Image: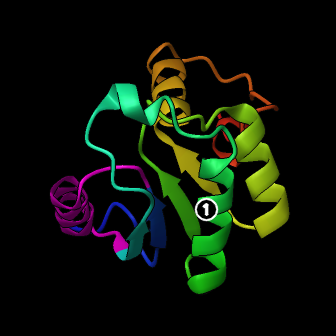
Amino acid sequence: TGSRFPNRSRTIVCPSTQELNRRKKEFLEASGLQVLNISGPEVAKNSDKRKLPWHLPYTEAKKASLEFPQADGILIPCGSWNSGPEVVEFLERDLGKPVITSQQAFIWAGLKALKIKEPVNCFGKLLRTL
């Protein structure tokens, strides 16, 4: 079978424990995605993740992109982190590569399941591809 992510490499930015990050990496690589790096503060509790500074997802993703410029994109798989539309739009504009967050992916999957094909123009490249 073919890879779900042909020729795709990502750097992941997420405030999680090392163990959880290891499991994320194993899962994504088993799906065919090349994970170049996982970075971010080590935080175990979701309630503590919501207390992190609002700018942290942006600054961590920008730092990871500079450290791994060969990455095709950035993945931010944490629903408890402030990675809403404005963060995605700024990162994609500033880095010139796609950014995918868990919130964005949930919205995309829901709209696809409902067969809604109207592009969403304020939450990154993924939702503009509906």
Q: Position of residue 71 (x, y in %)?
A: 55, 78
**SS state under label 1:** helix
Q: Mark 1 = which residue? A: 61
Q: Quadrant of the N terminus?
A: bottom left
- Residue 120 lies left or right of residue 52; in this view the side is right
Q: Position of residue 101 (x, y in %)?
A: 52, 43
Residue 30's image quarter? bottom left
Q: Is residue 10 above or below residue 69?
A: above
Give the residue displayed 68% in from the left and 53% down from the top. 58
Q: What type is the residue that disc 1 sits on?
A: Ala
SS majority, magenta? helix
Q: Quadrant of the C terminus?
A: top right
Nearer to the camera, 120 or 104: 104
- Residue 108 lies left or right of residue 39; in this view the side is right
Nearer to the camera, 126 or 13: 13
Q: Position of residue 20 (x, y in %)?
A: 20, 53
Give the residue displayed 28% in from the left and 69% down from the top. 32
Which residues lie in the magenta part? 14-34
Nearer to the camera, 79 or 71: 79
Judge the density around disc 1: few (<14), some (14-19), many (≥20) Cα neighbours within 10 Å.
Answer: many
Q: Is residue 23 above or below residue 109?
A: below
Q: Is residue 69 above or below residue 130?
A: below
